[in-house]
Amino acid sequence: MVQYGPELDTGFGALADPTRRGILERLGDGDASISDLAADFEMTLTGLKKHVAVLEEAQLVTTQKVGRVRHCRLGPRRLDEETAWIARHEQMLEARLDRLGDFLERTKGAST
Amino acid sequence: MVQYGPELDTGFGALADPTRRGILERLGDGDASISDLAADFEMTLTGLKKHVAVLEEAQLVTTQKVGRVRHCRLGPRRLDEETAWIARHEQMLEARLDRLGDFLERTKGAST
């Protein structure tokens, strides 16, 4: 059984929430402070900070405190492993469907 | 702000656990009963059933009870939306890095 590192857990986990995906999209347009993001997503600072902490743990966002303001920007992490995992799953699914198709074809051939 | 359906939440959420990814890989090799999977993953039936329920809700697995045995197989759901979301994110990240590169190049030009 292939074992994957915890990167996939934190990566997929970070993406499993609409607000967190929204924050990543928002930061794609430009850096923003925690307060900016809280206002954009109509959320309390506490709630927003929790989402940013999850994104930071997954290295999808980095934050820096300048004076009293914490600035957020997209982190260095790419999602190549996640993409590769999904691509392998899709290939596996295709292969299974092909085998099922072959089986049905053979069964049909046998019954006529 | 683009809004995404709950499919991405359940899709990414289902993939955020190593046992659930393992179950999908295992079912890629062939169908299996809940008991088979519990043995493979050295897990209690109760624990295994919870993971299968999450995968079933995400339509990544379908189950069928035949007699006293519940059989699991890969579900019909493809992960195209998840792939598309990640691809858009990567493009956005590239674009940001390009802009940063341009900025640094201009700054360098201005300072010489």
Image: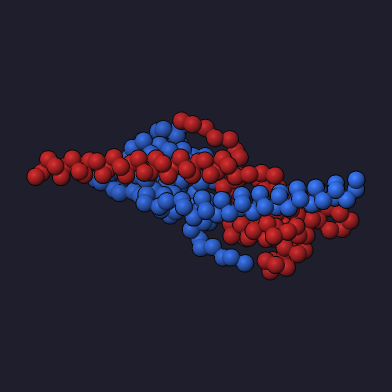
Chain colours: A blue, B red
Identity of the residue drawn at 40% across and 36% down:
A26
A16 relative to B110 in the view: left or right = right
Who is closer to the viewer here, A14 or B112? B112
Q: Position of residue A11 (x, y in %)?
A: 49, 52
Q: Is residue B69 above or below residue B10?
A: below
Q: Position of residue A34 (x, y in %)?
A: 36, 41
Q: Is residue A75 above or below residue A29?
A: below
Who is closer to the viewer here, B2 or A40? B2
Identity of the residue drawn at 53% across and 56% down:
A9
Find the residue positioned furthest to the top: B1
Q: Position of residue B29 (x, y in %)?
A: 69, 60
- Quarter of the picture containing the N terminus of chain A is bottom right
Q: Position of residue A16 (x, y in %)?
A: 54, 46
Q: Is residue B84 above or below residue B72?
A: above
Identity of the residue drawn at 46% across and 51% down:
A79
Identity of the residue drawn at 73% across and 53% down:
A99
A48 relative to B68 in the view: left or right = left
Is any part of residue A45 visible from this angle?
Answer: no
Q: Is residue A18 above or below residue A102?
A: above
- Quarter of the picture containing the C terminus of chain A is top right
